[in-house]
Image: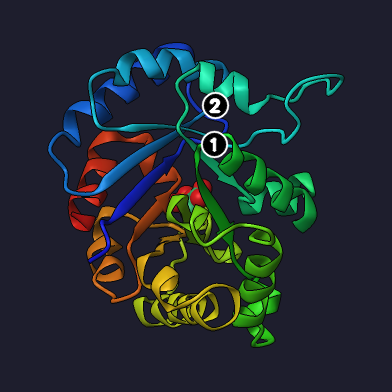
Amino acid sequence: MRTPTVGGNWKMNTTAASARSLAAEVAASCKGSKAEVSVFVPFPYLAIAAEALAGSAIKLGAQDAYHQPDGAFTGEVSLTMLKDCSVSTLLVGHSERRHVIGESDSLINAKVLAGLEAGLEVVLCVGETLDQRERGQTDAINAGQLALGLAGVSAEQMSRVTVAYEPVWAIGTGKTASAQDAQNAHKAIRAMVADVLFAGQVAQGLRIQYGGSVKPANAAELFGQPDIDGGLIGGASLKAADFAAIVAAAS
Ligand code: PEP
């Protein structure tokens, strides 16, 4: 039985004041949840959110990191710095980083490996664009992003990896994959992990989140699918009550 897991990706939103109050509200409203809950907070507000989450079971996550430990990498943030801010979970390969910022699969892989090496939990995002979906390439795209993103990860390290399947066309658009389409993609991801990348035991333990316009109204149907183990939530994670309702649907 896999413990459900829900992440709230705040993206480039909040202020110091609203990050503090949102983190405090999430801690209060998700108290006692059976799901594992994380919030992915903008870098400048990590320390503020850490204070507000102190004593709660909510994990503090970063939306990105650089894979090098220190040095001449102007503008980047290291894993050591993130750990200093109480970060325990790292989001890697979000579609906005792949498609807006232009991150490659090899950079994403370097970040996955560095995050695991630093002892963090890693959420690796994969997913197809609308064009790829219309060409019937969903499973092939997910398989390629998984194989490249997880290259060099050991079976033992996989216990700290979560995969987030996020069809790019569903993120922030209000369009959601149908529960059956999402289940089909998740099943194919689990089969790929079992048959090609690792083994059945690793695949059975792997948590696979669905992301893409999850709301309180559609969460229960999505999370009710056998291979959907929770969600990665963008817009709806900025309202504590909506996020808590989604967490409750996963629990
Ligand atoms: C996301 O940011 O990962 C996401 C899924 O966003 P939204 O829920 O707004 O579609």
Q: Position of residue 27 (x, y in %)?
A: 24, 28
Q: Which residue is mark 1?
A: 11
Tell me whether the residue at label 1 lies in contact with that at label 2, contact meaning CB atoms closer than 8 angstroms.
Answer: yes
For the C terminus, the quadrant is bottom left
206 or 5, nearer to the observer: 206
Residue drawn at x 56%, y 23% as measured from the top left? 82
Element type at mark 1: loop
Q: Is residue 4 left or right of residue 203?
A: left
From where the camera sits, is residue 79 visible?
A: yes
Q: Position of residue 114 (x, y in %)?
A: 66, 40
Eyeballing the image, is 116 above or below 40? below
Eyeballing the image, is 153 above or below 32? below
142 or 239, nearer to the observer: 142
Q: Residue lying farthest bottom?
A: 136
For the N terminus, the quadrant is bottom left
Residue drawn at x 53%, y 56% as measured from the top left? 171
